Image: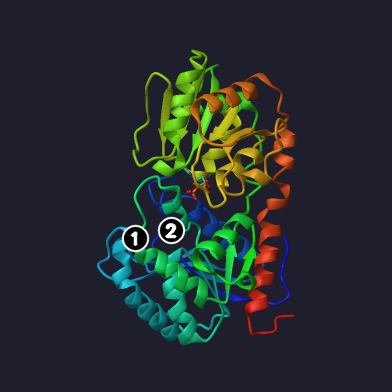
Amino acid sequence: MKKDSSSLKIALLSVHSCPLQKLGGEDTGGMSVYIRELARELGSRGHQVDIYTRAHDPRDQQVYYLDTNVRLIHIEAGRVEEINKLAIFPHARDLARNLNRFKRQNNIEYDVIHSHYWLSGLVGLWLHQWWNIPHVTMFHTLGAVKNTVGIGELEPELRITSERDVAAGCDRVIAATKRERNDLINYYGASADNIAVIPCGINLDLFSPVDMQLARQRLGMNGHKVILYVGRINPLKGLDSLIEAVNHMNDADVRLVVVGGDHEQNHSDKLVDYAGQIDHSELPYYYSAADVCVIPSHYETFCLVALESLACGTPLVATDVGGIGSLIKQGENGHILEDNDPERMAHAVKTVLAGKYPKNAARDAVLKYDWSNIVDVMIAQYRSVSSKSLN
Ligand code: UDP
């Protein structure tokens, strides 16, 4: 394990989403995984990481020790209960003040703030002024781009304006892809010099191939061909097109397994087994049990599911969104779709089911995304914006 020569103290802001919440619900997905993994890797190298989130459950302690050098800290702002993301906005200033008080009372000095999502970005702007330290931000999704895609609820102007302010007022925006970088420039007028492109990472120890028969036995799956969907269930994810595609295949030997969604109970219908929300640590078995994983999304910023599936050796059929285009070698580890037309999707899935897609061709494509490599580049960004000389 790498140890860095001089350690940083980093405040990670995840105001609206607690990284301890169950994954796969409406609002808990890639960003929570990202923050946990980034913090874990930074902590293992000797950096001190505090993740701040809004207190949302009276049963929670204020401070949890998650991993070596990593704490999760709940800060009160508004009533201590679950509220929707937009309802947090009026409490954002209180959250920043209370966080500042916690820092003062505990005599903590940070080197850098790293905020995640626009609500945390706003809090980051205030802290950046009060603490006089650099502020790095990541949006994870962009309201203006979601609105352009035009599927699902419209994002309010408040979000778009806030994203513009955060992009203009921070020291560095981390974009997950060149496409996100261009979107930041085109939709928000962000300065190109202020954006660094750093792809998302993957935990290759957790996500590695398991023998398909063993995985299926563990999950109680029978001998059908298995098409897998993993993710939140939200109109932008395009699950309806995938269900239509599987319908179109009209193959009694095929089952679609859907992982994620707010419902806890698993249930099945004619074509689909809904597994509900599954613990992240169980997912390697699902990917390994599947013949193909399909990502029918209309919009992704990067898409961790793509990295996870390939890391487990499972080929992908996916729309060309987020970072997926750079992961797939057409015909070797999957197929890229130009859109999520169900007939073309069905055709691509059949091609993969009938073909040979060696596990190592899938996994090799994601080796460079190991968190250790990604964190090297992230630390270089922290250092480049930091006034402190660390070497
Ligand atoms: N996930 C999970 N359990 C579930 C559903 C999803 O652990 O039941 C995880 C999945 O493994 C992935 C993340 O949620 O790490 C989804 O991230 P992605 O970037 O694909 O989509 P996002 O949620 O950011 O739109």
Tell me the kind of residue under disc 2. Gly
Q: Locate residue 34: give its quadrant.
A: bottom right
Q: Locate residue 53: give its quadrant.
A: bottom left
Residue 147 visible, this orientation = yes
Tell me the kind of residue under disc 1. Pro
Please name the residue shown 51% across and 75% down the image.
168
Give residue 385's position: percent from left, percent from top: 63, 78
Give residue 159's position: percent from left, percent from top: 38, 64
Colour convention: rainbow
Label 1, ligand 1: CB separation under 8 Å: no
Specify the quadrant that holds the C terminus: bottom right
Q: Nearer the viewer, residue 42 or 162?
A: 162
**Is disc 2 in contact with disc 1, using a CB cutoff of under 8 Å?**
yes
Q: What SS does tag 2 mark?
A: helix
Q: Using residue 80 as the reference point, say whether residue 70 is left or right of it.
A: right
Label 1 sits on residue: 156
Please name the residue shown 56% across and 80% down the image.
134
Please name the residue shown 41% across and 64% down the image.
160
